Image (spheres, helix red, strand yellow):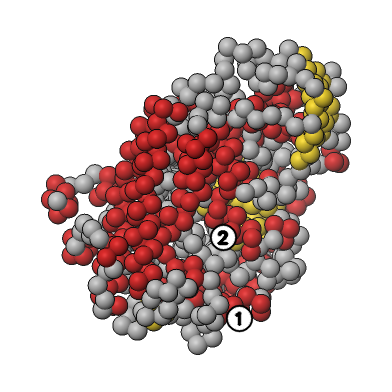
Amino acid sequence: MTTVIKTLLSVCLICSCLTSQAVSDVTFNKKRLSPTLELARQELTAPGILPDITQIRVETRSRPSDGNDSYEITRQDDRITITAPTDLGALYGAYHLARLSASGAHVPSHISESPAFALRILNHWDNLDGTIERGYAGRSMWKWDELPDVMSPRYADYARRNASIGINATVLNNVNASPLILSTPYLHKIKALADTFRPYGIKVFLSVNFATPMALDSLPTADPLDPAVQKWWKRKADEIYSLIPDFGGFLVKANSEGQPGPMDFGRTHAEGANMLARALRPHHGIVMWRAFVYSPIDADRAKQAYMEFQPLDGRFDPNVIIQIKNGPIDFQPREAYSPLFGAMPATPQMVEFQVTQEYLGHANHLAFLAPMWQEFFSQVSPASLKAVAGVANVGDDPNMTGHPLADANWYAFGRLAWDPTLTPEAIAGEWIDSRLIDPAETPADIRRSLIDMFTTSRETVVDYMMPLGLHHIFAWGHHYGPEPWCDIEGARPDWMPSYYHRADKAGLGFDRTPSGSDAVSQYPDSLRSVYADISTCPENLLLWFHHVPWDHRMQSGRTMWQELCHRYATGAARAARYQHVWADARPYVSPAIWTDVNRRLITQARDAQWWKDACVLYFSQFSSQAPTPEVYPIHHTLPDLKHINLGIDNYTNPSPALLDSLR
Ligand code: GCV
């Protein structure tokens, strides 16, 4: 397989040597192939797949009651059998073989797979005007003005890419939802997408605006206890299901960041969610109700979701799932897990990860996120969750993800949603082998260095942005560069970096112990005591839970100030080293991808310097200590950095004045 062929990765998952023969004999126990089995047949007869296999037999029982996506693959010499209870299971089996084939891996004698979560769903934050909130890969894939008459072939590509990694559902629109999405013309557009996605086993869901009855049909209220409102939603659900019989349901952001919700009418989240759930229930639809809220109670931001939702445990209808971000603040490079997980035993819960890199360098930085999600699953048992959602990093860029290596995050999300026990190394290896290099032609040490670059990259970003549990010291609005000094008059205090870092002459970090905000008390007892004690709190969360004196002695023997400098210096140095790893990989990667990634790695290394310089210089004003020698060279001065406001727009389109100030 040549590296050039792998440039086609966005359109071709099975990119084995095009000159190879297809498997000659692919048979099915069914006489008539469903659209899903037809897709499986296409995968299994693709040129070059499984060169040493001559026969593949697909046995499906299609008992809908089996209702699962499992499959078994058995191999005897050069013959393979895929057995599955459903056609979709067989398709997943075909994708499994395609993955093994694309990475040149051997097909073992027996494979048995069954997903850990029944619902593995992407959340798009796509707006109806074609923009994407926190999207860095172009504009929305959904061409609303063309749909349903014009169906881009990319819709099927998108479905295939999802299905090939086990994703089985998608929320098409932003949680900051336009009421228009539920208008009849839009429902016809959505039906066209759902029809395209169906053979791939992808169910469609929509984000809904809680006040839609008022906005679309001028009802005087959206009060969930008002019979006219209830009737409106029932009718709307009936209309949706008449067009899309397997429609999945609704995702709702209510009473958060200006979105309407039941609390506007004096009702609870449970009353709001249940009203929608009852409209969907006759059709087997579900409601995913987000716990990302800003409680009106004046409490530590990290405590608010728990305070608002935990008392509602047991009050939600069975077809409501509470969708909770992995951490209690907002997708920071590192957060403690949200204490709401496990705190509502009578309520189904699901986790929301962010695949798009809002807080991790957008599409400019390499941050392979499997380690972050794995860290979450090491704290929150997958068995306690009903589903996994990921905020998509997909747009209409030619490669769909902007940064060519960000495709690995989409891939990792799907693979972990299927099997949360997979290691980041294994996932990185799969992706690199099947979509970046030809492992047979790439020296083992180069392949190993690439895997290391991937698996260390998230920690590298943590180190140069927010080590030791620091969080939310991003520049205002775009969340790209550092702005620990940011102070916007009149803005919410809990959107200000100083609210989180609390730097003063005594130390750094947010005291969430019982003598501070006491957020530690929201965790189970065993963890509460660990987090509350500065001597047992994990150092990677130290400044999350404690206001730590500058001269506090760390495990390394350094003081906290020295350790902070060390982390910033190490992170920036590691980001710079990735360019060498990439340079060594050059002969084994397609030239177009190599050049694109190289450019982004240069940007990342430069940004890491900006982060290091900004944070070390800013915090040194409070520590009253000079940066340690390893932080040098320091390339910028604090006044310059403050003047620049390190925004992505400034950065990608620097003004002459900005360039001057950096010289
Ligand atoms: C969709 C953060 C992001 C917002 C996002 C919000 C949410 O605040 O910055 O862009 O809005 O989270 O998850 O609802």
- Residue for point 17% across, 53% down: 662
Residue in front for this viewpoint, 292 or 538: 538
Residue type, numbered disc 2: Lys
- What residue is pinned by disc 2? 325
Label 2: element kind: strand
Residue type, numbered disc 1: Ser
Residue in front for this viewpoint, 101 or 143: 101
Q: Picture coordinates of residue 498 (x, y %)?
A: 35, 73
Position above or below: 448 against 174: above
CB-based contact (under 8 Å), mark 1 and mark 2: no
Q: Which of the 4 image quarters holds residue 163? A: top right
- Looking at marks 1 and 2 on the same chain, the residue that comes earlier in the sequence is marked by 2
Q: Which of the 4 image quarters holds residue 108? A: top right
* Visible residue check, residue 301: no
- What residue is pinned by disc 1? 529
Residue in front for this viewpoint, 195 or 568: 568
* Visible residue check, residue 526: yes
Label 1 environment density (alpha carbons within 10 Å; few <14, some 14–19, many ≥20) = some
Is the residue at mark 2 in contact range of ligand 1, meaning its CB lies under 8 Å from it? yes
Q: Picture coordinates of residue 107 (x, y %)?
A: 72, 29
- Residue for point 25% across, 60% down: 632
